Amino acid sequence: MNFLLTPDQEILRDTLGEVLGKECTPDKIRNLYESSHFVDLELWGVLADMGLFGILVPEKSGGLGLGCLELVLIMEQLGKFAFPGPIVEQLAGCIGYLTSMAETLPHLFGEFADQTLQNLLSGKMLASIALEGSQPIAYGGSADLAMLVESRAEPFLIEISDDLQLIDIDLVDRSYQLSQVVNLSAADIQTSTRATPLITEPYCDLNPLDIELCDITRRITFDRCSLCLSAQLLGLASWILTSTVEYVKVRKQFGSPVGSYQAIKHHLANARLAIEFARPPLYYAAYNLEQFSSNLASLSKAGDNFALDYSAYERDVSFAKVYASRAAGLCAKLALQSHGAIGYSWEHDLHMWMKRVWVLQNQWGTEDFHLDRVAQQVCES
């Protein structure tokens, strides 16, 4: 078995890295910190021009026809450059969910859902997603649309307008936005004129198999977003480690570069090991999730066995998120120790990457949530 990336996957990853290196500079991230905006539309347009919003969409529908492994590769690069905006929520969440529905439940995927998918593929609209009515919406105050896909309930597309009162949650990362709806409940939103169902039949009229498939699609969407967050965390960790290595080569103490001291070497070696040990679980989970997703239509014949079949994939995703969160957190901690006081100064770029790590560690499942999910699977097996 060949565990290496294919040449095409390496080209995709490296090409995006080169483009982001020119376009998504630390100065642009700093500008977001110093402004009231959370999304750089020029950067958003760069991804749209590359066609990356269609990475999960089949070629017959205007996409690139790639899979979850390629998705985490580009997310790792986006994390490396602290790319701002709801890229996980739009690409892995909204577009991924609509694509899965079109492939798995085509009889429920109507003209409205298809038109929504095409709008999102163009990159001209920003969208986010929430899988629980009480869940804060990532970049909700900046998005045009939001999907609400609750468990065992009808999925809706919500138009974000001025009368939908959103309050931003205070975060340490001022380039990341979490918004909470304060004037309407989830039930009120669904019954308002701004909410449009994403399936062609009322949820209460669906047969048991379709209900099960809808639930599995929702669970896959959560795990896909969680994997993308894991990839971004590893990208952030890689940038933090690389910048720290460069810094300790030139920072001198007692006449010698601080990187020459054994304590610093051990710190950075431990950080590198954490990143390298976190990457295989991520790729493994992404590969397995893609295999399950691609066979979901044929697996629909399994009926009631779906939940049992999918539980192992959730465990793999949780392993990946825990490893990535811990690796990124360790890199942030050791980088700050290696930099010293300048590491948390406003003028240095390091603080922006560290703050993104601290925010993403708690998105799409905290470490405790994923550890509990792994423990449950282990106990049940």
Image: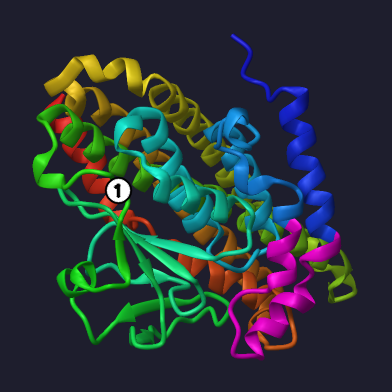
**Could you tell me which quadrant the N terminus lies in?**
top right
- Given residues 343 and 263, the one toward you in this image is 343
Residue stretch in magenta: 22-46
Q: Give the residue drawn at x 30%, y 35%.
A: 315
| The quadrant where residue 5 appears | top right
Query: Is residue 267 visible to the viewer in this orientation of the structure?
Result: no
Query: Is residue 320 visible to the viewer in this orientation of the structure?
Result: yes
367 in magenta: no
**For the stretch drawn in magenta, what is the main secondary structure?**
helix
Report x, y in % for residue 49: 76, 53
28 in magenta: yes
Q: Is residue 351 left or right of residue 230?
A: right
**Could you tell me which quadrant the C terminus lies in?**
top left
- Given residues 325 and 89, the one toward you in this image is 89
- Given residues 362 and 168, the one toward you in this image is 168
When the figure is inspected, residue 352 is found, relative to residue 230, above or below; the finding is: below
Q: Give the residue drawn at x 55%, y 69%.
A: 356
Q: How is the image coloured?
A: rainbow
Please name the residue that numbered disc 1 is placed on.
370
| The quadrant where residue 43 appears | bottom right
Q: Is residue 360 left or right of residue 315?
A: right
Q: Residue furthest front?
A: 111
Report x, y in % for residue 189: 23, 72
- Given residues 147 and 312, the one toward you in this image is 147
Q: Amino acid at mark 1?
A: His
Q: Is residue 86 left or right of residue 322?
A: right
Q: Give the residue drawn at x 38%, y 24%.
A: 292
| The quadrant where residue 345 appears | bottom right
